Image (spheres, rainbow, N blue to C red):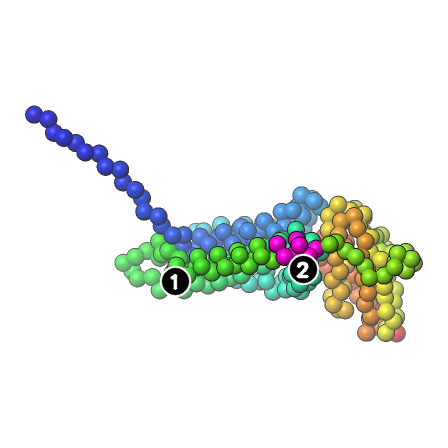
Amino acid sequence: MSTLMTLTRTHRPYTRPTLRTITVAALVANALFFVPDLFSSGPNGLNLGHIIPALVVAAIVASRFRWTPALGALFSGLMLVDGSIFLTNLLTQPDTAAIFALAATFFASAVVGLIAGIAATVQNYRAPRSRPFTSQPAPRWTYLALLALVALVLGGILTTAIQSGGVAPSVSPEVLAALPVLTAKNDLFDQPEIRARVGETVALRLENADTSTHYLDIDEFNVHVLMPAGKSNVAIFTPTQPGTYTFYCHPHADKAARTGMVGTLVVEP
């Protein structure tokens, strides 16, 4: 007598990612924002000072503690606050689609990390005792929100790619050639000091001899001018207060420590 044995294949049901997982993914994406600079300019305090903390926070959030997503939300919020000035400039006045894509990715990942981290923390502390908080899937609306955000970013990149035509200063070549020059080369400015007077318009021809993108940043006068790799641009501003100020390139300088691409702007009365 034989017994008929039936083999059945069991399918593991799809489990939606948790809000914690989404927070970790956002932190990793946030860290990747500085990877292009890591390869173009080499390791420095700025890119390593962001990549390493972002990955460390991602690892902590991935641990099985209720409170760790809140740390991810805090880190993402700090990144939004710290980069608000430059993000506004890059997203509203991008020079290339690639630069816009990097800025938009950074902004989107920070927003996702902030919202998902807060939602995960709330969800963890509201989870019933009969169901471990670590297995709580993300709400269904999360995917619609993520899809809308991706569509918005891709639409912005496409629009920028269509409209981008490079830097075209609105001055004649003769006038451009007569302007004082500030050159970026080997991740340094060629002039340690610029002098100006209160109320007088300053016009500088910016030359970038490097293969990486630079900026001329003077926070006190809201100057944040792009210096595309291998191209020229013009910075025009009017100092309103006498004093000594720092000009720098935010991706390649530590303004507080005055290392990297930094210089001094002296404004006389």
Res. 83 image quadrant:
bottom right
- Percent x, y for residue 77? 55, 63
Residue under label 2: 90
Sequence-first tag of 1 and 2: 2
Crowding near the residue tagged with mark 2, few <14, some 14–19, many ≥20 C-alpha atoms within 10 Å: many
On residue 1, the disc is: none
- Does residue 110 appear in this view? no
Name the residue at 49% across, 51% down: 25
Quadrant, the C terminus: bottom right
Picture disc at residue 123: 1
**Residue type (three-letter) at the residue carrying disc 1:** Gln
**Which amino acid type is marked by label 2?**
Leu
Q: Main secondary structure of the magenta part?
A: helix
Say which residue appears at 32% left-offset and 47% top-offset: 13
Give coordinates of residue 125: x percent, y percent: 37, 63
Which of 232 and 221 lies nearest the eye of the viewer?
232
Q: What element carries label 2?
A: helix
Crowding near pointer 1: few (<14 within 10 Å), some, many (20+)? many
Q: Which of 233 and 56 is in front in this view?
A: 233
Residue span colored magenta: 157-164
Quadrant into which the N terminus falls: top left
